[in-house]
């Protein structure tokens, strides 16, 4: 089975550059469905999830190229011929549900399969469909699909009961072509939501309240603008490398990032005794001789991101003392704790909370499983901090969300290798 092989290492040193944000690129690619002129994106990461979203658009009639090795991707949605993304693709990636809003808004019809649940918990879409209804759509559920119809969406007050990232993005894209003004209340404030707003604005949509929980969108009659757009850096990928460097007791930086997007993480890293210095577009960290324990509670932005909880938890297992992790966004996102226990950590979990009895040097390399993308990243960090070799089954997860991971760790002095590929430095042999 494809796996990731990690060698325990000493302190990591050096600089890595963050790739473009996966979670911003995915809805931006979907938002291209609103535009009947070509869009040329930059800083798009070459990841499996991006390829799936590209396939979704291609299956509807879009002409797509890239992303190439420079992060360039072009999407032309002039000749969309279908409004029903296939189940095989939506099932492979829940994020493709954000095609609902733009398809409905531009073509008056969309049939998107209901995404199933996943390892980290149920993934309901009630907020997405409620937003479409508020904008005047008729929504039915037929044979496992959400079917949405509206001759022309009407601008409206949209109240989300949960500040869902995906539902806010879907509502924004739908409102972009609704008639008149829409106000989205209790909007998610994640940077990847603000980024969808910025992209819509670059396509000519007038938007107020970007980055806040009340966003006003002035709908357009249509979008017909060829444009270039560069995607923001990936704060979750960046945070993963910062945690790896600091947790290894090393010092180094992550470049090409927006430091303000990582404040919830860096303030917690400081509580652990890690030295953090913010530059204009980079963050440098330096791990202390001994990490201090702390508590985290995941929450919607600007709270501590659930997508960094598993990786942060690994550092807590090797801190000196007791820490607590409360997972409030995806309560089942705890699958990495039993695996960390198998590596020597002492963790008790119950009802979305983990109590960790941290002990420096407690981890040793064994064979472990990963159950989701960020859990897989957490196991890579655990492997780097452990004595010996760790073999992680779950390479497909890493390919969904971390671009050039072995190469980036190699540049920091770490050894992470994919078992179905030649090891770094062996490719020419
Ligand atoms: C996005 C991110 C994911 C991140 C999450 C929270 C992408 C592709 N994925 O996922 O990496 O972990 O934000 O920051 O950007 N909910 C409902 N009803 C709904 C929608 C959501 O109850 O209709 C609940 C979910 O079950 C979850 C919470 O709201 O408990 C947050 O989910 P949401 O913000 O929608 O996450 P995603 O957009 O799926």
Image (cartoon, rainbow, N blue to C red):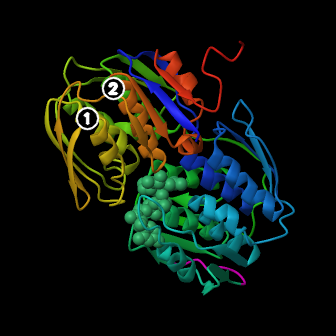
In what element is the residue under mark 1?
A: loop
Main SS category, magenta section: loop
Q: Where is residue 173? Give x, y as percent.
A: 62, 64
Q: Residue at x 55, y 83 (%)?
A: 133
Quarter of image, res 267: top left
Mark with earlier residue (1, 2): 1
Q: Residues within 10 Å of mark 2 (few under 14, many from 20)?
A: many
Q: Nearer the viewer, residue 125 or 346?
A: 346
**Image quarter in which the C terminus is found:** top right
Q: Is residue 21 left or right of residue 414?
A: right
Which range is magenta?
151-156
Q: Where is residue 290? Give x, y as percent.
A: 19, 21
Q: Is residue 36 left or right of residue 229?
A: right
Q: Where is residue 15? Give x, y as percent.
A: 48, 18
Which quarter of the frame holds ligand 1?
bottom left
Mark number, residue 386: 2
C-beta proximity under 8 Å, tags 1 and 2: yes
Q: Residues within 10 Å of mark 1 (few under 14, many from 20)?
A: some
Q: Nearer the viewer, residue 254 or 359?
A: 359
Q: Is residue 165 left or right of residue 388?
A: right
**Residue to which mark 1 is pinned:** 344
């Amino acid at each position: 089975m494809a796996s990731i092989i990690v060698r325990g290492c000493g302190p990591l040193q050096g600089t890595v550059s963050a790739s473009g944000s996966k979670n911003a690129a995915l809805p931006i690619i979907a938002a291209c469905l609103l535009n009947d002129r070509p869009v040329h994106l930059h800083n798009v990461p070459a990841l499996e999830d991006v390829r799936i979203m590209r396939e979704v658009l291609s299956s509807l009639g879009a002409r797509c190229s890239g992303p190439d090795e420079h992060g360039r991707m072009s999407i032309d949605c002039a000749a969309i011929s279908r409004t029903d993304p296939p189940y095989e693709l939506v099932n492979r990636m829940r994020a493709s549900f954000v095609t609902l809003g733009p398809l409905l808004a531009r073509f008056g019809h969309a049939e998107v399969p209901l995404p199933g649940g996943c390892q980290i918990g149920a993934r309901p879409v009630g907020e997405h469909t409620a937003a479409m209804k508020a904008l005047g759509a008729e929504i039915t559920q037929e044979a496992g699909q959400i079917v949405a119809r509206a001759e022309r969406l009407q601008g409206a007050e949209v109240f989300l009961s949960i500040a869902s990232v995906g539902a806010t993005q879907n509502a924004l894209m739908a409102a972009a072509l609704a008639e008149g003004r829409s106000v989205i209340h209790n909007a998610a404030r994640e940077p990847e939501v603000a980024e969808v707003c910025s992209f819509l604005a670059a396509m000519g949509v007038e938007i107020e309240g970007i980055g806040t929980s009340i966003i006003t969108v002035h709908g357009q009659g249509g979008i017909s603008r060829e444009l270039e757009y560069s995607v923001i850096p990936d704060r979750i990928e960046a945070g993963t490398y910062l945690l790896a460097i600091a947790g290894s007791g090393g010092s180094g930086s992550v470049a090409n990032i927006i430091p303000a997007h990582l404040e919830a993480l860096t303030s917690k890293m400081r509580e652990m005794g890690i030295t953090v210095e913010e530059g204009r577009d980079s963050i440098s960290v330096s791990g202390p001789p001994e990490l201090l324990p702390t508590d985290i509670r995941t929450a919607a932005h600007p709270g501590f991101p659930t997508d960094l909880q598993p990786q942060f938890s690994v550092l807590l297992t090797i801190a000196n003392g007791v820490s607590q992790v409360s997972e409030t966004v995806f309560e089942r996102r705890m699958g990495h704790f039993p695996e960390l226990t198998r590596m020597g950590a002492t963790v008790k979990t119950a009802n979305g909370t983990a109590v960790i009895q941290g002990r420096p040097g407690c981890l040793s390399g064994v064979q472990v499983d990963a159950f989701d993308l960020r859990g897989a990243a957490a196991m890579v960090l655990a492997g780097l901090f452990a004595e010996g070799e760790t073999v992680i089954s779950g390479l497909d997860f890493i390919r969904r969300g971390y671009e050039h991971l072995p190469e980036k760790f190699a540049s920091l002095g770490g050894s992470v290798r994919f078992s179905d590929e030649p090891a770094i430095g062996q490719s020419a042999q």
